[in-house]
Amino acid sequence: MSAPLEPSADVKPSQRKGSLLRTVRAVAWSLIGLRKGSEYQQDVEKLNPIHIIVVGLIAVFLLVIGLIGLVNWIV
């Protein structure tokens, strides 16, 4: 059985530092569904959950807009 993938208790989410590129990359891999366990653990420790939520919402919005555009272009 693996160890729980929880962040350390002494680091608050607002104190985590993570680059925008790393956050975008983590969200993109999550949307695809391919993610290594070790990379997930690093993301849990380094990325701010608020940034992940914002980037995730933007990514889903862009995906929906892209699909609507593709359908309108085809039809």
Image: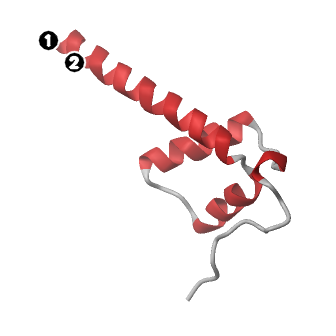
State the residue lying farthest toward the bottom: 1
Q: Residues within 10 Å of mark 1 (few under 14, many from 20)?
A: few
Check disc 1 and report its element: helix, strand or loop.
loop
- Residue 43 location in percent, x, y? 68, 55
Query: Is 41 rendered above or below residue 50?
Result: below
Q: Residue, x 59% and y 34% (percent of image)?
A: 54
The N terminus lies in quadrant: bottom right
Check disc 2 and report its element: helix, strand or loop.
helix
C-alpha distance separating marks 2 and 1? 6 Å
Three-letter amino acid code of the residue under disc 2: Val
- Residue 73 location in percent, x, y? 23, 10
Q: Is residue 68 left or right of residue 65?
A: left
Q: Residue, x 68% and y 59% (percent of image)?
A: 44
Near-viewer residue (47 or 66): 47
Asked if marks 2 and 1 touch (Cβ < 8 Å), the reply is: yes
Q: Is residue 61 left or right of residue 18?
A: left
Q: Which mark is residue 71?
A: 2
Three-letter amino acid code of the residue under disc 1: Val
Q: How is the image coloured?
A: secondary structure
- Residue 33 location in percent, x, y? 43, 53
Q: Which mark is residue 35?
A: none
Query: Is 24 rendered above or below residue 1?
Result: above
Q: Is residue 30 left or right of residue 3?
A: left
Q: Residue, x 60% and y 46% (percent of image)?
A: 26
Query: Is 4 rendered above or below residue 62?
Result: below
Query: Is 1 rendered above or below residue 52?
Result: below
- Residue 8 location in percent, x, y? 78, 68
- Residue wearing tag 1: 75
